[in-house]
Image: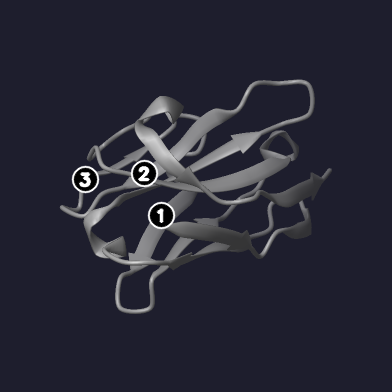
Amino acid sequence: VQLQASGGGLVQAGGSLRVSCAASGHSFRSYTMGWFRQAPGKEREFVATLSWNGDERYADSVKGRFTISRDNAKKMGYLQMNSLKPEDTAVYYCAAGARPGAVQERLYAYWGQGTQVTVSS
């Protein structure tokens, strides 16, 4: 599976943005899809995950503001981000793995390049 993230940009605090992840290759529908982010000077962290069986999980910091979704027919994944805060500024990465509900990076075998999201105050 090859992944490519897009849709990042500059947005004001309180605004919304949707980042996308395009997948190529076979069996996308059978993979768990995850989103991670890395802020400057910080380690990459888990944001959200959605598995093939509907198992959906979020980091506490984004719960209620972010929504993960996928369109298996189009081989696309999405992360809708609402009520954005300056602390959401980071490079956002999409990933695919086999384990439903996975929140650890090591459980994701496939990674896309990141897309920059910058939230201004």
Q: Is residue 22 above or below residue 41?
A: below
- Give the residue type at disc 1: Ile
Instruction: Identify the residue position indicated by label 1 in the image.
Output: 68
Q: In what quadrant of the picture does the N terminus appear?
A: bottom left
Crowding around mark 1 (Cα neighbors within 10 Å: few <14, some 14 to 19, many 20+) is many
Question: As rendered, which of 26 and 11 lies closer to the eye?
Answer: 26
Label annotation for residue 23? none
- Give the residue type at disc 3: Asp
Q: In what quadrant of the picture does the C terminus appear?
A: top right
N-terminal label among 3 and 2: 2
Instruction: Identify the residue position indicated by label 3 in the image.
Output: 55
SS label for mark 2 = strand
Q: Is residue 63 visible?
A: no
- Asked if labels 2 and 1 touch by Cβ distance under 8 angstroms, the answer is yes
- Give the residue type at disc 2: Thr
SS label for mark 3 = loop
SS label for mark 1 = strand
Which quadrant holds residue 100? Answer: top left
Instruction: Identify the residue position indicated by label 2 in the image.
Output: 49
Q: Position of residue 9 (x, y in %)?
A: 77, 59
Quick one: which residue is furthest to the left in this view?
Answer: 53
N-terminal label among 1 and 2: 2
Q: CA distance from mark 1 to mark 2?
A: 7 Å
Question: As rendered, which of 16 and 74 lies closer to the eye?
Answer: 74
Crowding around mark 2 (Cα neighbors within 10 Å: few <14, some 14 to 19, many 20+) is many
